[in-house]
Image (cartoon, helix red, strand yellow):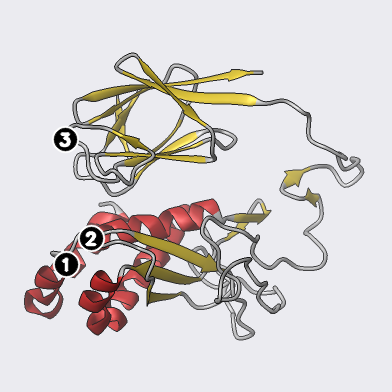
């Protein structure tokens, strides 16, 4: 059973259905849970072949109406979300530098149903275990870095700063590049540019940013008028390699004939959301 499904089942049994009433707001807990998983994936830092460190301190920003509904249950919900992050980390073999915490905060610039997730990596001097899903030992605690334009230190959305790292990287690591100890460090990346776009019903939509959100909401980067599509259905990321991630949608995504929550994309990949088919394209130059 998937981590998100287990999380939903645990919520259903909490406080004799109290959450069922609270979560009739547009922001659903499974959406927040999916966002926390993506925050881990997007900020994972590889130390060596056995260890990948992810953030352990999260802030979920909510609109004023959603925050008022959820804040009385923030402690219990925060514990459940932290448990989900721990389960997901164990599944992905991620490790943490300290205890996992999830906080809810109000954001006056957000409309009802919208949210943001910010994260940072905080080291704990008492960490004793390095197993997947546990705090990783041997990393010094460092002061958080100030993220531009934020009152909270160390948080950013999208991520503006990498997690704290030791002064000396593990042997053979050079900025995420696995190289022999004697290999020279590349001075610069090749100046190649890859163009990314999608095609929906014959219409081309250029992907000019690192992420592109698809959904039925007017808040989505590309709006799809399909009753089988959720408000924020999925997200395309133009990384290396490019990927697509389900955002906790109702009907999920199908990529090249496979029902999935996350997949690597190639030129010509066919994505089905609801009854709509999307073709992913990329080209050099």
User: Which quarter of the picture shows residue 65?
Assistant: bottom left
Circle nearer the N terminus (3, 1)? 1
Q: Name the one closer to the observer, 214 or 65.
A: 65
Would residue 275 be found to the left or right of residue 44 on screen? left
Would residue 284 be found to the left or right of residue 205 on screen? right
- Few, some or many C-alpha atoms within 10 Å of disc 2 (few <14, some 14-19, many ≥20)? some
**Residues under numbered marks 3 and 1 in contact, where contact means CB atoms less than 8 Å apart:** no
Q: Which residue is mark 1?
A: 23
Would residue 3 be found to the left or right of residue 210 on screen? left
Residue 226: which numbered mark, if any? none
- Few, some or many C-alpha atoms within 10 Å of disc 3 (few <14, some 14-19, many ≥20)? some
CA separation in Å, label 1 and label 2? 6 Å
Tell me where residue 221 appears, x and y as whole percent. 39, 39
Residue drawn 34% across the image and 42% down it: 220
Dot 3 lies on which element?
Answer: loop
**Residues under numbered marks 1 and 2 in contact, where contact means CB atoms less than 8 Å apart:** yes
Residue 261 to residue 225: above or below: below
Any part of residue 93 in sight: no
Q: Name the one closer to the observer, 184 or 201.
A: 201
Would residue 30 be found to the left or right of residue 160 on screen? left
Circle nearer the N terminus (1, 2)? 1
Residue 21 to residue 181: above or below: below
Circle nearer the N terminus (2, 3)? 2
CA separation in Å, label 3 and label 1? 21 Å
Residue 28: which numbered mark, if any? 2
CA separation in Å, label 2 and label 3? 17 Å
């Amino acid at each position: 059973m998937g981590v998100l499904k287990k999380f939903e089942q645990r919520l259903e049994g909490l406080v004799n259905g109290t959450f069922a009433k609270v979560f009739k707001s547009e922001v659903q807990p499974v959406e927040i849970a999916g966002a926390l998983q993506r925050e881990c994936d997007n900020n994972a830092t590889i130390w060596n072949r056995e260890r990948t460190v992810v953030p352990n301190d999260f802030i979920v920003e909510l609109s004023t109406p959603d925050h008022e509904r959820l804040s009385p249950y923030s402690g219990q919900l925060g514990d459940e979300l932290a448990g989900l992050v721990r389960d997901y980390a164990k599944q992905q073999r991620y490790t943490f530098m300290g205890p996992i915490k999830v906080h809810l905060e109000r954001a006056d610039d957000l409309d009802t149903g919208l949210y943001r997730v910010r994260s940072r990596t905080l080291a704990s001097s008492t960490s004793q275990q390095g197993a997947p899903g546990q705090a990783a030992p041997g990393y010094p605690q460092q002061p958080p870095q100030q993220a531009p334009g934020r009152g909270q230190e160390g948080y950013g959305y999208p991520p503006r700063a990498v997690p704290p790292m030791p002064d000396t990287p593990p042997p053979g690591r050079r900025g995420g590049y696995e190289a022999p100890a004697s290999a020279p460090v590349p001075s610069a990346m090749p100046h190649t540019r890859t163009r990314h776009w999608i095609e929906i019903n014959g219409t081309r939509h250029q992907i000019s940013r690192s992420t592109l959100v698809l959904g039925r909401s007017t808040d989505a980067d590309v709006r799809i008028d399909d009753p089988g599509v959720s408000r924020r259905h999925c997200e395309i990321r133009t990384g290396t390699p490019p990927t697509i991630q389900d955002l906790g949608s109702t009907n999920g995504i199908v990529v090249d004939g496979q029902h999935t929550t996350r997949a690597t994309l190639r030129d010509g990949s066919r994505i089905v959301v609801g009854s709509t088919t999307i073709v992913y394209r990329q080209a050099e130059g």
